[in-house]
C-alpha cells in the first residue's frame, strides 16, 4: 500500500498579516506554536499558496487563536 503525504496550501502573506494583527513578533508566534523563529520567517517568505503540512497549520492556527479553516481562508 502506498501512502500519500497530506499537504494544505496557505498564503504566507496571510500568515504574516494575521500575526501582525495580533501584535505578535515572529519570535512570539514561534514560541506559541512550538517552532523556531527561522521557520516562521521561511513560512512567511514563501509567498502565496505554498504547501504546508497539516500539523504546521494546526500549530499556527492554535498559536494565533483561530481555526485552521480561518488560517486557510482566501
Image (tube, rainbow, N blue to C red):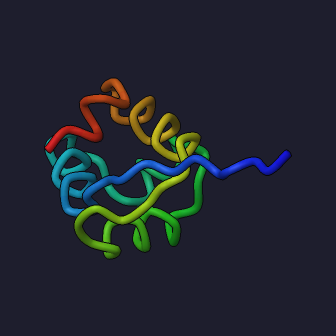
**Nearer-the-camera pick, 56 or 36:** 56
| Residue depicted at x 19% and y 38% | 73
| Residue depicted at x 24% and y 30% | 70
- Toward the front, the furthest residue is 1
Picture quadrant where residue 65 is located: top left
| Residue depicted at x 29% and y 48% | 24
Is residue 70 depicted above or below 21 in this figure? above
- Toward the right, the furthest residue is 1
Picture quadrant where residue 64 is located: top left
Is residue 18 depicted above or below 44 in this figure? above
**Nearer-the-camera pick, 45 or 29:** 45
- Residue 50: horizontal and vertical position, in percent? 36, 65
| Residue depicted at x 67% and y 51% | 4
Query: Quarter of the image containing the N terminus?
Result: top right
Is residue 6 depicted above or below 66 in this figure? below
- Residue 56: horizontal and vertical position, in percent? 53, 47
Give the number of callouts. Answer: 0
Query: Quarter of the image containing the C terminus?
Result: top left
- Residue 66: horizontal and vertical position, in percent? 31, 26
- Residue 33: horizontal and vertical position, in percent? 52, 42
* 19 left or right of 7 in image: left
* 46 left or right of 28 in image: left
**Nearer-the-camera pick, 38 or 4:** 4
Amino acid at each position: 500500500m502506498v501512502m500519500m503525504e497530506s499537504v494544505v496550501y496557505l498564503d504566507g502573506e496571510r500568515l504574516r498579516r494575521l500575526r501582525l494583527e495580533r501584535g505578535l513578533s515572529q519570535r512570539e508566534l514561534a514560541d506559541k506554536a512550538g517552532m523556531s523563529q527561522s521557520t516562521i520567517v521561511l513560512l512567511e517568505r514563501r509567498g502565496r499558496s505554498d504547501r504546508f503540512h497539516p500539523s504546521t497549520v494546526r500549530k499556527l492556527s492554535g498559536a494565533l487563536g483561530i481555526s485552521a479553516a480561518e488560517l486557510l481562508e482566501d
